[in-house]
Image: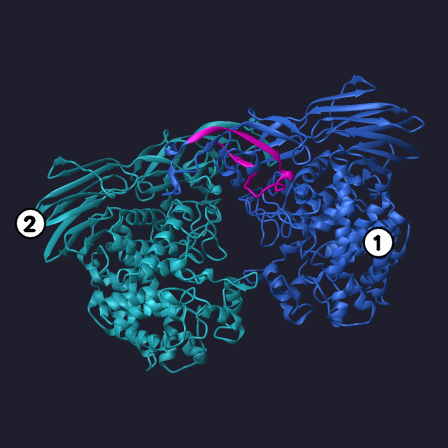
Chain colours: A cyan, B blue
Amino acid sequence: MPAGPRATAESLPITDVELDDEFWSPRVETNRDVTVAHQYDQLETNGCLENFRRVADGETGGFEGPMFIDSDAYKWLEAASYVLANHDDADLRERVDEVIELVADAQQADGYLDTYFQLVEPDQKWTNLSVMHELYCAGHLVEAAVAHYRATGEESLLDVATAFADRIDQQFGPDGQTGVPGHEEIELALVKLYRVTDEERYLDLARYFVDARGQRPSPLADELANIDDIAGANFVHHGHTAAEGARNHFLRDGEYDGSYAQDHQPIRDQETVEGHAVRAMYCYTGVTSLLQEIEDDELWAAMRRLWTNMTTKRMYVTGGIGSEHEHEGFTEDYDLPNDTAYAETCAAIGSIFWNQRLFELTAETAYADLIERTLYNGFLAGVSAGGDRFFYVNPLETDGDHHRKEWFYVACCPPNAARLLASLERYVYGRGTDGDALYVTQFVGSSVETELGDETVSFTQSTEYPWDGETTIEFTHDEPVDFDLRIRVPDWASDVALSVNGASVSASTADGYVSVEQAWNPGDEVTLSFSLPVDALTADPRTRADAGRVALRRGPLVYCIEDADQSVPVESLTVSDGADSFEPDHDPDLLGGVTTLRGSGTAIDLDGWEESLYRPAESVDREDVDVVAVPYYAWDNREDGSMTTWLPKS
Amino acid sequence: MPAGPRATAESLPITDVELDDEFWSPRVETNRDVTVAHQYDQLETNGCLENFRRVADGETGGFEGPMFIDSDAYKWLEAASYVLANHDDADLRERVDEVIELVADAQQADGYLDTYFQLVEPDQKWTNLSVMHELYCAGHLVEAAVAHYRATGEESLLDVATAFADRIDQQFGPDGQTGVPGHEEIELALVKLYRVTDEERYLDLARYFVDARGQRPSPLADELANIDDIAGANFVHHGHTAAEGARNHFLRDGEYDGSYAQDHQPIRDQETVEGHAVRAMYCYTGVTSLLQEIEDDELWAAMRRLWTNMTTKRMYVTGGIGSEHEHEGFTEDYDLPNDTAYAETCAAIGSIFWNQRLFELTAETAYADLIERTLYNGFLAGVSAGGDRFFYVNPLETDGDHHRKEWFYVACCPPNAARLLASLERYVYGRGTDGDALYVTQFVGSSVETELGDETVSFTQSTEYPWDGETTIEFTHDEPVDFDLRIRVPDWASDVALSVNGASVSASTADGYVSVEQAWNPGDEVTLSFSLPVDALTADPRTRADAGRVALRRGPLVYCIEDADQSVPVESLTVSDGADSFEPDHDPDLLGGVTTLRGSGTAIDLDGWEESLYRPAESVDREDVDVVAVPYYAWDNREDGSMTTWLPKS
C-alpha cells in the first residue's frame, strides 16, 4: 500500500509478496476458498445484490437488510480484489465483474449511490448522517474500487467510486452542507482515492471531514434534534427505529453527547479514546493517512496522545479494544471487564489498520509490536480454526455459552476478517520511502520481489513463528543491492542473536530493530533468533478486573485455559504469581498444531458451597493439579466449556 | 407484626419494644428527627401533595412527578405512623392527619384513588398494569393505613384503604379483569389488610394476584402488544415514554419476556430468582405472608428453592441483591460484578421483609442470620453516618465517584430506609405462636413488655453488638413465667458460652439457637457470649468477579478498605489468602466509633506502567504495607477515594 510523502516506510504492495507460511497460509487459503465464496453467497441471500438490481430496474421500495447493507457488496469486492491480486481465478474475476456491473447500473446519473435512499427515501438523502451510514457505504465503495484497480488495473469500479466521490465533494465542504459522518470510513477512503487519482480535492475533502468532527454546533446534534423528521425515522434496525437508536447512542442524560462518534470535541483536542471503538479506529486511521500527506503537528500530537491512552489504559492484553456492549466501545481508563468484554473483532482489525498507518508514518516498532499482538490474539480469536465461523464479541472469560457464528445480520466482522486475511501480505514488510531500508516487521514465511529505490530486491523469509523464534532471510536477487535491513525485535524477546551467512554478528537492538546495512548479495542469509519467554503478566493494578490474577504469555501469544484440557473445571483453578511452573510443549495434533503451556496450579473444591456462596478461606479444600494453557486465539474450537485468560492467584 | 396462623413465631408489635442501643438508637433517632421530617418536606416540594389537592379540587391535568408519586405520601404516612407508635408527637400527628385528609378528599366516591389517572387519563384506568403502578400505589396506601391503625387505633386512613381495596376487589379476580400487577406490593399489603379487618376477600384477592402471575397468555404481554394505545403511552419517565420503558424492560429479542416482573412462569414453578430485585422481594414477601395463612406445599417449595438460589448463587457477601443496572435486577448464577453492582438499597430492604416472613413461618435461624447480614451491610451502607444521605446503588468497589445523595426523583430508597429504621423493633424478637417460646433474633439493646400466651413478660437486652459478642437479657416482670428462651447464635459465631444468673450452663446450640426452658423469675439474668472471629472469606470460585480475592468479615460485619485509611492507594493493595494478619482495633473516634481491622499486605508500585498496561509479574515492584479495613456500611463518609471489598491476593 503506498504511503504518503511524509511517511518513513510504506507497506509493500501485496502483489510483491507471496505468503508461504505454516501458520498463516492455511488460514489465508481457507479465507480465499471458503470465506470469500461464502461472503458472496450472502450477498444474494441477504438481499444486498437484489437491492442494487431493484434500483437499476427503476423500482422503489422493497429494500432489504440493515441500512448499510450496500457495504456488504463493497467489502466483498475489496476482499475478492485482494485475492485476485495474487491468485487469478477466472470464476472469481467474472463474479467480481458482475457485481461491479450491478453496482454501476444502480448509480444515479449525478453519481449518487445508496440503495436504501434510492429505494426508500429518495428525498431524504444526506439528512441523517448520524445513523444512516451513507458516507460509510461510500467509503467502502472507494476502498473496494482502489483495491480492484490496484489488483487488476481496471477502472470499472474506480469510475463508479470517483463519480460518487465527486458527488459527495459537491455536496459537502466549506461551500456546501456541513457534514460529520456518523460512522467514519470516508476519510481514510478518500486518502486512498487521492493516491490512485492524484486529485487533490479528495485529499481536501478528507481533511474537511476530519476537521469538521467535534465542532460546535455539531450538525449531528442538529440531526438528533429533528430525528423524527429526517431519514430513517421509521426504519427499524435491531428492534429499534433509527430514531430510537440515535437517541440511545448519542444522548446522555437527554443532552447530545457526540463521543459515540468521536464528535465530542475536535479530534486535535481529544485526550482519550472514546465511543464506538470501530468508529474511533477508522477515524484515527483516516487521520493518520492524512498525516502521511500533510503537516499538522496538533493532529499528530493528538494521535500520539490517543494511542498512549488506548494502549496504556483502555486495551485488553489481547490487543482487543472497546469494553462495553451498549456503545460497542470505550468506557473509562482501566475499565476492562473480562467476561462482559466487547472487544469486537472489527475493532481489533481497525486497530491494525491504524497501527499500520502509524508504522508507515514513523517506522517505529511499537506500532508493529501492537499489530503483532492484535493479529495473533484479539483479531485471530475472531476466526475459527476452520476459518468459517466468526466472533463478533471476544470475551476473555466465559462460562461456555459464547460461540462463533457463521454470519451475522450486521455482517461487519466476517467480511472485515476476510479483507484483512486476504491482504495479510501488507503487514509483513515495509520499505523506506527514501529507498534505502527494508523493514521486516512480522515473522511470516514468504517470498518477495519488490523495488527498493531503483533496484529490485528479492528474498525469502523462513520461520516457524509463532512457535519458534528463529527466522531466516535469504536474498535471491541477481545483483548486490546496498540497503539497511531492519528486522523488528519484539518488545518481549530475550536472548537475541543475529548471524549473517552463518557468522554471528553483534546484534545490538536499537529502537526495536536489529539493523545491518551493507550490500546484500544473492544467496546472503541473515538469521535472527530470540527465545520466546513464558511470562506471567500482571495488569496495572488500577485494572480491577485483573486484580489478583495473572495472564500467561509466550512470545506473541496470550494464553488461556479451557475446560477441555483440564482435569478440574476452569473456574476452580488458581495459579502462583509467577510463570516458573509453566513450560512450553508443542502438540502437533492439538488445534491444528499449537504449543501448549504446561504447569501446575491449585484447584478449589467446587463441592461444599451448597449452603453459602462465601466461606472462610481456611475451610475451603484445595488440591494441587496440572494446568494446561492453549493460545487464546484457539479457544472455542472444541466442546463447550469454560475459558479464562486471567488466572486467579492461589 | 402479627403473623398468620401457620406461622411458628410472630414479630413483637413495635409498641412492645423500646430500643436503647448504642449502635442503632442514634440511627433510629436521626431517622425520626431528620429523615421523616425531610421526607415530609419532599412531599410538598415534589408536587405529591399538590396532586392530591388538585384532584380534591376537581381539577384536571397538572400532574407532577413520576407516575407512582402517590406512594411517596403513603410511604411517609407509614414511616410517620411507626414513629407515632412509640413516640407521640403532636406536630407529627397533626401533619399525619392533614395528609390523611388530603388523601381521603382525593378519593373517588367509588373508592378509586390514583392522582395520575384522576388528573391525566381518567378513562384509561387499569389498562396498563405493567408500567403505571396503580396497584403498587394502592399497596403502599394499604401498608400505611395498617401501620396508622396499629399505631393510633384510628380508622381514618384505614377507611380510605379498605374502600380502595374493595374497588380493586370489584375490578379484578375470577369474575372480573385478569390482573397481574407490574410491580408487586398489593399482594403483601392485602394480607396485612386481611389481618386487621378479618375480611377474607382481601386474602382471596392476594391469593388471586399471586396465582395470576406467570400464567399464559399473560395480561402484561397483551398490554405490551398495545402499549402505544393504553395509559401512559405519552408519559415521559426517566427520559423515556412509558411505552419505550415497557419495551425496554419486558421485551427480549422483540418477544415478551415477563421475568422483569416475575411473570415468566407461575411463581410455584419458578426455580431461580429473576428480574427486578425489589419486585421479586415484594412478590415473595407477599407469597410468604400468604403461606402464613394458607397451606400450599407447592408455593412453599418454590419459596425454599428461590431462597436457596438467591443466597447460594445470586447474592453479594453484603446481602445485597440484583447485580445489573439495566433491569435493576438479577442476572445469572454467580454473576456478581463488584464495581458495577446494582445492589439497590430497596432490594436489601425487600430481602429483609421476605426473610422476616420466612422467619415467622419457620422460626429457622437461617432467615434471621440473613436479616442480620443484610441489615448491617447491604442495607446500612445505603444510609450515611449522618442519616441524611442515601445510596440507591451499592457497589462493592469503586474508584471514588459514587456518593450518597440527599434524595432521588424516584424516591424509593430513602423512604424505604425510613420505614425500616422506624420499625426496627419488629426484627429483634419473636414470640412463639403457641405462646411458649420467646425468640431473641437480633442483638439490639432494648426493653420489652409483651404478652406470651396469657402472661406478661418484661425484660431488657443489653449488648455492645456488633463490636462485642456478649449480650445479657434481664427479666423485669413481676411473676415467674415458664417458657423457652431461644437466642439465635449467628452462623459464624465461635466460643459460644451461656450463663444463667452468673452460672455457666451447657449451651448446646441446636438449630442455630441456644435454648433454656424454665420458669423465668423477676431479676433472672441470661448472658450469651461468643467471639467475633475475623475471617477472610473466599467466594464460590464460580463467582468470577471474586476469583483471586478475599473479603474480610468480623462477626456480622463485612469490611472494606478505603483510601482514607491507607498509606498507599487502595488499588495497589493485595493481601494474603488468610485473615491471620488482621486484628480488631476499636476506634471510638472514627466514623462514629467502629472496630477497624488492622493487618499487613503488599502494595504493587503504581509507577512504571506508563508504557504498558501489562508487565511480567517479576518486573513489578512490591512493598510490605499496613492495611486498615473499616466496616462496609461506613464507607463513603469521608473524603472521596477508592474503596474495595474483595481484596486481591498477593
Please state which of residues B578 and B368 is positioned toward the viewer in this rendering: B578
Please state which of residues B257 and B228 is positioned toward the viewer in this rendering: B228
Res A284 seen here: yes
Q: Is residue B259 magenta?
A: no
Res B114 seen here: no
Is B140 located above or below residue A146 in the figure? Answer: above
Q: Which residues fall within the magenta stretch?
A: B622-650
**Does residue A532 appear left or right of residue B239 in this picture?**
left
Residue at x 26%, y 68% (from the top left corner): A194
Residue occupying the far top of the picture = B503
- Assign a secondary structure to mark 2: loop
Badge 1 amino acid: Ala
| Crowd around label 1: few <14 · some 14–19 · many ≥20 (10 Å) | many
User: Which chain's residue wears label 1?
Assistant: B
Please state which of residues B453 and B494 is positioned toward the viewer in this rendering: B494
Q: Which mark is residue A480?
A: 2
Residue B45, image x, y percentages: 73, 60
Is B437 located above or below residue B320 in the figure? Answer: above
Residue B641, image x, y percentages: 55, 42
Q: Is residue B634 magenta?
A: yes
